[in-house]
Amino acid sequence: MTFTPGAAGAPLVEIRNLWTVFQTPDGDQVVHRDLDLTIRRGEVLSLVGGSGTGKTVLLRQILGLEHPSKGTVSVLGRAPGQFSAKAAANVGMLFQHGALFSAFNVLDNIAFPLRELKVLPDELIRDAALVKLQMVGLDPKHATKSPADLSGGMIKRVALARALIMDPPLLLLDEPTAGLDPEGADGFCDLLRGLHRELGLTVVMVTHDLDTLFDLSTRIAVLADHKVIVAGTARDVIAYPHPFIHEYFLGGRGKRAMEALHDGSVPASLAGPAGDAPASHNER
């Protein structure tokens, strides 16, 4: 399957009236308040926001690892907590530091989710894991290595292979290029872009890295004031008047990224036509 960037389809994830409240010794801490967000099939949506705005928490709620205090999260029409083990394969997750099992070798790490289903013969599982290993750009000779023997970039690729082992339509990425040098980050972005196109993935990504943000996103959602204040193309988002957006996008690094936007090196699906109407700030 080949996906054409910008051709986002029907809603895959719908979040409505979401509240996240944590109890602390100093009282309730509200992270999200009446947060609304729609994620459409085939897009690469990046979540940005300041520290404490609950970006990773939101990923975990989409995955079903955490539950909102109020409101609903729907993935393919169902709450993540209602998924059976087989249906949970609809969502793959790449954690920030890989989260590989140190006692398993590379191939066993990749195969782990498939083995947990206990429905396929081991030979077939190993073959599937080897396919995914090569899909993320790693040679089969690395299959028997332990995570301790891998570079940071290789760990991320193995973790990505594991996230894709069940062929999920939805992939969640938490700081996918964190800890990588510029060359490694560029290579990983190239890999993600290629997989997105070839597999038709829907991707939700949390990143602080502006280069990664502009390189991969087809849409950006900004978390501030306990909710999504704006979601749209880079032009839409940067035009929205808010102190965080001004500081984040128009600081030193933001200005360099903006230069890429203006010189046309940012994908048109992210930049949007110059005459586009501003994105709706109401995600309902």
Image: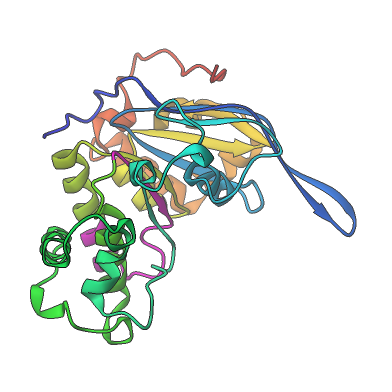
The quarter of the picture where the N terminus appears is: top left
In this picture, which residue range is highlighted in magenta?
A: 169-188
Toward which corner of the image does residue 150 lie, by quadrant? bottom left
Give the image location of residue 222, x and y in percent.
Answer: 54, 36
Residue in the foreground of this view, choosing between 54 and 256? 54
On screen, residue 117 versus residue 238, left or right, reads left
Residue in the foreground of this view, choosing between 271 and 93? 93
Seen at 30% across and 72% down, the residue is 155
The quarter of the picture where the C terminus appears is: top right
Residue in the foreground of this view, choosing between 54 and 160? 160
Seen at 46% across and 17% down, the residue is 278
Toward which corner of the image does residue 18 lie, by quadrant? top right
Residue 182 on the magenta segment: yes
Residue 93 on the magenta segment: no
Residue in the foreground of this view, choosing between 61 and 33? 61
Seen at 39% across and 45% down, the residue is 88
Give the image location of residue 70, x and y in percent.
Answer: 70, 33
On screen, residue 153 versus residue 22, left or right, reads left
Seen at 12% across and 61% down, the residue is 124
On screen, residue 203 versus residue 190, left or right, reads right
* Residue 252, above or below 11: below
